[in-house]
Amino acid sequence: MSKLWGGRFTKATNQLVENFTASIEFDQQLAMEDIEGSIAHVTMLGEQEIITHAEANKIIEGLQTIAGKIAAGNVDLKVEDEDIHMNIERLLHEEIGPVAGKLHTGRSRNDQVATDFHLFVKQKTKEVMELVAQVQAAFVKQAEENSDVVMPGYTHLQRAQPVLFSHHMLAYFWMLERDKQRLEDSLKRTNWSPLGAGALAGTTFPIDRERTASLLGFDYVYPNSLDAVSDRDFVLEFLSIASILMTHLSRLSEELIIWSSQEFGFIELDDSFCTGSSIMPQKKNPDVPELLRGKTGRVYGSLFSLLTVLKGLPLAYNKDMQEDKEGLFDTVKTLDGSLRLLAPMIETMKVKQENMYQAVEQDFSNATDIADYLVTKGLPFREAHAIIGRIVLYAIQQNKFLLRLTLEEYQSFSKLFDKDIFSVLEPKHVVDARNSIGGTARKQVVKQLEQARELL
Ligand code: ARG
């Protein structure tokens, strides 16, 4: 069949152009959204009596048949038909004959593709939110099961102050909660309908944009036709949120990798989530978090690619915009794979609490607490800080930890020390003393857990 737009051409398209401009290889992922959008459009055309009811019904039936065939993998999609929109229109012609030609009344591929893409991104946003919630649930489960486990907290990757392992897990819960909120919020904008904007300026037919919007579950109709066909903010927004989300997953991955090293030995990932080495029989590698950390790059890449595509485009549609899809599809696939793996991997990881506790006992992360102790005895914090600095230096020179110094040794630095200093230095006490809102004290973490459970 010749091109749907072939009328003003005298020559066939160069084969290289055909291959270069076609998007069918990837935009076939929009097939169902395309049919859904077309059914809404044609329903409205019938209701507005722009075409007859009989014609509308025939087209709708034809589209439904094609949807069934596509679902069953029973159609031949052609590069000559360039994209999914024209492929489906050609299939409709084959199915119901010339009346198929009435489908595109009052519509352009420009508002059509924008509509399809809105529907797709909307659906994927909801799916990703659901997957994020499953990972959050895994963090909650680990936090509940290890609510008393104490581990070193770090700054600069140097032991800083002990924290509860559950506190650390919940830190990730809250990051993901913000990601979920961002996704939810983005739906307010993704849920605008561009359908009926035409090529760029609207249409001469008495269409009803509110009606197609409501048929498609959109909350709002783009008030400006030029903006409607040119806007890809909703894609940028999804990719931005995805990038932030991947940043979080990548930071988590980095911790899981470090923690499962022999040097740390804080956790062990389940065998079913690790892989071995082809040469070193002893190896158990954290490939999943490593790959997740690595895949973060391609998601950032998709965001930057689309920002760059859009930055110089005049209104309205330009073919450059066809480049909006592959990065988004790839990002959806990356998020889906990553999140689906993370939930069970977190849930099944083994927490080695003795190693964590040992690490806490063999460090100076209770030093702040000795300073706070002197402050409660009336010394200004800066003075206390200086004294404890000297005590730490002394302890390092003596090859001892703070809990092992004697009261006489403490008193040689300040007469304010008494024997109650030793209970202050116990890791559990150090943790529980941080009872400010959002602190690592058990009481606070229990409150956090309640909030977290409520949100899920
Ligand atoms: N395949 C095109 C895309 O994805 C569809 C829109 C084509 N519109 C046009 N005027 N050539 O952007």
Image: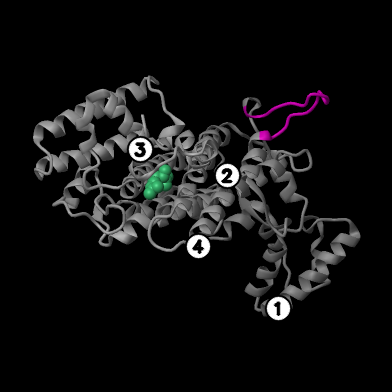
Q: Nearer the viewer, mark 4 or mark 1?
A: 4
Label 3: element kind: helix
Q: Can you give x and y, in whole percent of width and height, for residue 374 in the image? A: 69, 72
In three-dimensional space, the C-alpha distance between marks 2 and 3, rounded to whole angstroms, equals 58 Å
Give the amino acid at mark 1: Arg
Q: Is residue 170 left or right of residue 260?
A: left
At horizontal 56% and vertical 55% (from top left) the residue drawn is 304
Residue range corresponding to the magenta coloring: 273-287
Residue contact at pointers 2 and 3, CB within 8 angstroms:
no
Mark 4 and mark 2 in contact? Answer it, CB < 8 Å. no
Q: Dot 2, crowdedness within 10 Å: few (<14), some or many (≥20)?
A: some
The residue at label 1 has a CB less than 8 Å from ligand 1: no
Quadrant of the image occupied by residue 76 = top left
Earlier-in-chain disc, 3 versus 1: 3
State the separation of the CA atoms marked 4 and 2: 51 Å
Counting other residues with Cα less than 10 Å from the Cα at mark 1, is it few (<14), some (14-19), or many (20 or more)? Answer: few
- Relative to 452, is 352 above or below? above
User: Residue 148 got which mark?
Assistant: 2
User: Mark 3: is the Cβ under 8 angstroms from ligand 1?
Assistant: yes
Q: CA distance from mark 2 to mark 1?
A: 32 Å
Q: Which residue is mark 3?
A: 85
Q: Residues within 10 Å of mark 3 (few under 14, many from 20)?
A: many
49 above or below 345?
below
Mark 4: which amino acid? Lys
At numbered mark 1, what does the secondary structure look like: helix, strand or loop? helix
Sequence-earlier tag: 2 or 1: 2
